[in-house]
Amino acid sequence: MLKGEPLKLSLAEALKDAGGLGGQERRFTALAVRELSRHQRLLDLAARTLGHAPSRIGLLEDQALVRYVLWRRIFCGANWARIGPEVKLPGPVRPRTLKDDFLERVVMAPLAEPPLPESVPDRLATRYSFPTWLVQRLAELHPEPVLEAMLAALDEEPALHLRARPTGSRDEVLARLAEEGVAAEPVVLAPGAVRVAEASHKVFETRVMREGRLQVQDVGSQLIVEACRPIIEEGGGSLAGWTVADVCAGAGGKTLALADEVGKAGRVLAGDRSRRRLAHARDRARELSLRHVSFPHPLPLESADVVLVDAPCSGTGSLAREPDQKWKLSAKAVAEFHTTQLELLRELAPQVKPGALVVYATCSLLPEENDTVVRDFLAQESGFSLEPLAPVFGPERAALLCDGPFLRALPPRVPGGGFFAARLRKGPGPG
């Protein structure tokens, strides 16, 4: 991962190559990798405080090793008696120049509280291990208490959230999970959302999961799917029987949820520029026997009642789940995302039929990718209007989820990450 590979990909390949690991060992490995990336800035500060700056350690593998022992010491409260056996692997297993006595000193040496910068953005960026430029930008949008709570939420290992699938109800799914010894609870912000309250991942071995009654999906993603519903009554209407196009379907998380929304009488048309991710979405739809999901190319947008554009973005709202991305982002990259997102909306605008709804969504916290994209699009495409999202969610939830006409799901108020959505309605054509 330190050599540039995405965390998910490098972790999956390493676990595949390792082989022979049990479920608990695999989960610990995945957690440790995410934690080293998540807290990298603070761990490197601790290393410098001890006189072992990463820049003085030649091998990337050894830099990671120092971060690991410091993570076990600082965040897990482990001592050398516990950490030592974990890192005493024979040389051929892994490139290594650091001796065990060096690592023992890193764990046992007194560690003074490192001095933090005085400015609020710099202090919070250091404390929660974020790039300074990103925290400075967020500090322009949120007061200090809100900003710190947001960063703290994005700095934690996220809980496992799922969506209860038809037929039946969330209460029935929760009751069946309880029968199989899995502690879970409803998330009131989304009607099908379930939070698993224990970390063993036993939920994946349950009958209710094997029957396809549960799908892993963040709460914010579930809210974006809900934002596609028609406003027939306060609290939203039903998509049953409608045709929905999922333009940036990716691996199909929202595609599957939309398929449940439209039912067998409706249709979901899914597409994505990544063939690999779309192949995964196709496999998932086949496993669940969702025959009303298809993957035509090009997408016939003119036949869709609703078009979901879950646009490629910086992913700043998903950094708890993909912490390596924060070290790859830059202000320049965010500006480039803005250009791509606006071009995507403008490209599909003439293909959408009059009266259709376009839902634009991201998992970004930055207005450059959210509000600004929508307003720039409306300034350039006079045939579209902005619809408020509050009526979809009803007054109680809208008070927590909506900012003006937009869905703005921000952590920690909304568990699992930050998401944005806007509803754009195409007006009738001339005459």
Image: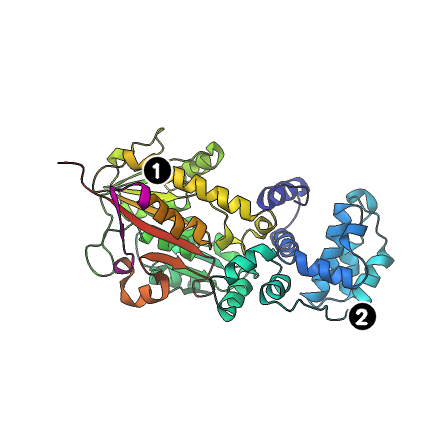
- Disc 1 marks a residue whose amino acid type is Arg
Disc assigned to residue 346: 1
Label 1 element class: helix
Label 2 element class: loop
Residue 108 placement, left or right of 232: right
Find residue 224 and report its horizontal and vertical position in percent: 36, 52
The one of 325 and 254 positioned closer to us in this rendering: 325
Q: Which residue occupies 51% across, 59% down?
A: 138
Nearer the N terminus, badge 1 or badge 2?
2
Q: Quadrant of the N terminus?
A: top right
Instruction: Please state the total of marks drawn on the protein image.
Output: 2
Q: Which residue occupies 30% across, 37% down?
A: 349
The one of 327 and 277 positioned closer to us in this rendering: 327
Can I make out residue 363 in this image?
Answer: no
Which span is picked out in magenta?
Answer: 378-391
Label 1 crowd (10 A; few <14 / some 14-19 / many >=20): some
Q: Which residue occupies 38% across, 42% down?
A: 288
Find residue 128 and report its horizontal and vertical position in percent: 61, 63
Find residue 266 and report its horizontal and vertical position in percent: 25, 41
Q: Quadrant of the C terminus?
A: top left
- Disc 2 marks a residue whose amino acid type is Pro
The outermost residue toward the top is: 297
Q: Which residue occupies 61% across, 67% down?
A: 119
Is residue 41 found inside the magenta-colored segment of the image? no
